[in-house]
Image: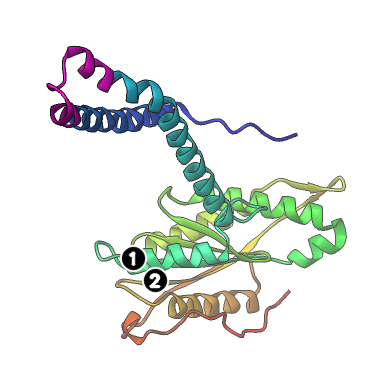
Amino acid sequence: MKRKFRLPRQAWAAIAIQTAKHMVFAVIISAIVSSALLEIFSQGINEVGLIAAIVAPIILGGPMVFGMTMRQFQLQMAYERLEAAAARDSLTNCLNHGAFVEAATAALTDEANPGGTLLVIDADHFKSINDRFGHASGDTALKLIVTAIAASVEPQDIIGRLGGEEFGVLLHGSDIEAARSTAEAIRQAVRKIEFVADDQSCTLSVSIGGAMAQSAVDFGGLFRLADERLYKVKQTGRNGIDIVPMPIEPSIATGRLYREPRIKRLA
């Protein structure tokens, strides 16, 4: 069954205002043209003619203009919804890989407040969850992890799924101690998740690597450094954090493109 598209109340008000603007313009043009024509071919426009010049475009064109304006708003809102949906990961509802990179790049190079801290978060031993309990349980675990991440960061921070069981968080600001505190809050929040699969209670944990930049920086360079720190955490036992400042060097001026680092992952 086709779902009926409903416009919000604010949209109806905007449609009415837009329609009114079009009709005022149409009435003015109608009155000017009618007056000019009657001045040429008769003794000019009288009161009745002026009323007709005003009423005619309203009656004849009003419904059509209203309908066209409404359709324009519907198409615009549908496009915005599709665009928003395309930027979201279908499972976790956080930004997908491409949208996260785009948003993080914009934040890192923002002229008013450049820089920030990138956290790369990887779910520990996630393959074993899928193998033991199935992918449906693994999907549930990922949703719970994203919920824990979102509850531990500020509303203005950016969360995205980089792929599989790996997530990225771009923290606004370049205070490394605050970033470490946030990363630790995420780690602890995940550990406290009550995850039950096939009547078995499972403990979840994450490894977090991070890199902080105090000025505008290329996303690819920051990601590579954060990813290296994540790899170190996974090599030394997982369920930990490692965040370092990025060395000051020419960044966005190099014009480097973001590419995934070729680092062998630990399961």
Q: Which residue is mark 2?
A: 212
Q: How many numbered markers are drawn?
A: 2
Name which quarter of the figure residue 111 lies in: bottom left
Residues tagged 1 and 2 counted as in contact (Cβ below 8 A): yes
Question: Looking at the image, which is closer to me, 111 or 176?
Answer: 111
Q: Is residue 226 left or right of residue 14?
A: right
Q: Residue 52 location in percent, x, y?
A: 27, 18
Q: Residue 151 location in percent, x, y?
A: 52, 46
Count neighbours of disc 1 (C-alpha within 10 A) and say few if under 14, some if 14 to 19, many if 20 or more: many
Question: Given the image, on which type of amino acid does mark 1 rest?
Answer: Ser
Question: Looking at the image, which is closer to me, 182 or 155?
Answer: 155
Magenta stretch holds residue 27: no
Instruction: Give the CA distance from mark 1 to mark 2.
Output: 6 Å
Q: Residue 80 location in percent, x, y?
A: 49, 48
The structure residue drawn at horizontal position 60% and vertical position 52%, both measured from the top left corner, is 146
Q: Which residue is mark 1?
A: 174
Q: Residue 10 location in percent, x, y?
A: 41, 29
The structure residue drawn at horizontal position 81% and vertical position 65%, both measured from the top left corner, is 128
Name the image quarter holding the C terminus: bottom right
Asked whether residue 162 is in view, the answer is yes
The structure residue drawn at horizontal position 67% and vertical position 53%, both measured from the top left corner, is 91
Question: Given the image, on which type of amino acid does mark 2 rest?
Answer: Met
**Magenta-tinted stretch:** 35-54
Question: Looking at the image, which is closer to me, 14 or 262?
Answer: 14
Q: Is residue 254 left or right of residue 129?
A: left
Tell me, for residue 195, which label it has, or none.
none
Q: Is residue 163 above or below residue 63?
A: below
Q: Is residue 18 above or below residue 100?
A: above
Name which quarter of the figure residue 221 lies in: bottom left
Q: Is residue 221 left or right of residue 160?
A: left
SS at circle 2: strand
